[in-house]
Amino acid sequence: MPTPLDRRKFFGSAAALSLSAASYANVAGSNARVRVGFLGCGGRAQAHIDLVNKFAAEGKPVQAVAVCDVWDGLEDEYEVHFGGKATRRRYAQGLYPSARKCGLDRADRSHVTKDYRVVLDRADVDAVCITTPDHWHGRMTLDALSAGKDVYVERPMTRTAEEAVAVVDAWRHTGRVVTVGVQSMADGVWVRAFDAIRTGAIGHVAHAQTGFFRNDVRGQWRFYRLAQQMTPKTVDWDLFLGHQFECAGRRVGPTPREQPFDRATFAQWRCQWPFSGGPFTDMLSHYLTRMTAAMGVRFPTRVVAGGGLYLETDGRDVPDVSTVVADYDEGCQLVATATTLSGYPTEDVIRGRLGAIKFVKGGFQVFRDDPTRGASFPPRMESAPEPSSFVAVEPPRNDTEAMWVNFLECVQARRQSTFCPPDLGAVAVTTAAMAVESYRTGSALFWDNEKRQIVPAGPSWAERGEQRSRQRAKPNQIFGWSGGDGGVVQPPSYQSLAGPWLNGKDPAK
């Protein structure tokens, strides 16, 4: 019988990545109210504010008590003309609209501010929700932990691998609760798939694929609105850029000389390298996190990236086609690809020696593969193959709500094992950061697990594999492996005739 897995040890998260009614009850039943400050009040922050306000209205022990944003903000209604239709929309983002939503006095500079450090200095703030542009995530998370706050930080957790290492160290040192907003990690399907994989359901894990695809004639991220009210008078441009701050030995952002004020840079910052990793971080971080969790791997040993800026030549820096190829010491590979030029998807699949797992709505399908039969599937499938079995896993009603309930529960219990803790968030950041550097330099990269840093790649990856083959070594396996040999090579009898002839002597005699 396979040994039961200590999932907390592996995931650094709750014993099961699913949301139960008991979770809600535990949060609502606590006497200590969690007072939340919001750092960054753009579109994503509004969803978080709405949830916290909803919880408070339901009598749960949480309250929004402070807001911070570098822009005064705007509330109005406007029309969107797209796809031959005109849609009337309500717009409310920025500092003062968010203060009104939270029931705060906009004149209260100690709770409504453009400087996040003011919020962190408040004794009446217990936790912060960080939804700023990516380049600020690391610095703000470190400062919040140092100030004794618990943290909900949107993904990606940081912009660079160095920042991710610093956050993980601070999280462990301070003992604070941190969750990274990879909403899909609230779904129990990933841990259920991992349990199936590590007990041998598909044999040795060999290859996985995932991806994300969008198609918008306006250009990806150009749908974020530019408003006339965004000006150097209403936006603290120095604080937005972050050039006066450092994180993990680097400036947080460029100087005003390097990046003059620009409404497009402010509202559509995902299009520019100084503030974002483009599709590598914004689109693929979700998929890298959950697929590595399901596969049973963590940091890749080798990463190479491809892609290019092929069509969306609208002033952006980041590519519109991007692909990450990550290789792992466990003996497997993950290919994650994204494009903003086509909406046609690829399947989320993990392939093993004895079968494959395909993730679908409400669970995953298992396809048996038989290496004793040769090709089990045709090279071109005119129709979808029939799965051998289906594992049903009910997803949460609302991913973001589930993440918040889990975060608040962990805050109340002083438990660091959230659905997506920093040591898991660092995996996606590191993989994406290696991909960005590989794409921009044209080089393959290694991750030094002992030094915890990115280093130039060399021939050692291929050489190690070749040496293992010559030694007929057993394969490496994923964490928690209890699935037997996983479908190792079974040489035919005539392989006994192989071997070098030395001094004219037949190796088979």
Image (spheres, rainbow, N blue to C red):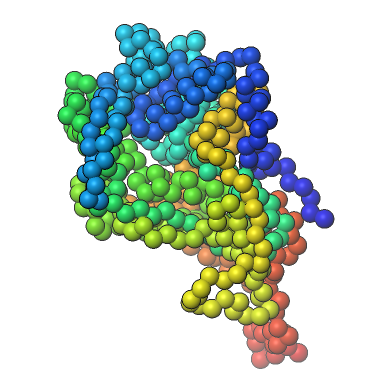
The answer to whether any part of residue 437 appears in the image is no
Q: Indicate the quadrant where residue 443 lies.
A: bottom left
Left or right: where 88 falls relative to 190: left
* Residue positioned 26% across, 58% down in the render: 310
In the rendered image, the vertical position of residue 124 relative to residue 203, given as above or below: above
Choose between 378 and 203: the one closer to the eye.
Answer: 378
Left or right: where 72 falls relative to 44: left
The answer to whether any part of residue 106 appears in the image is yes
* Residue positioned 60% across, 56% down in the render: 364
In the rendered image, the vertical position of residue 36 relative to residue 403, given as above or below: above
Can you say which quadrant of the picture contains the C terminus?
bottom right
Choose between 365 and 451: the one closer to the eye.
Answer: 365
Image x and y of residue 335, in percent:
48, 59
Q: Indicate the quadrant where residue 474 lies.
A: bottom right
In the rendered image, the vertical position of residue 145 relative to residue 474, given as above or below: above
Image x and y of residue 423, in percent:
56, 38
Image x and y of residue 138, in percent:
43, 31
* Residue positioned 65% across, 35% down in the render: 20
* Residue positioned 66% across, 26% down in the render: 25
Left or right: where 328 falls relative to 67: right
Image x and y of residue 78, in percent:
23, 33
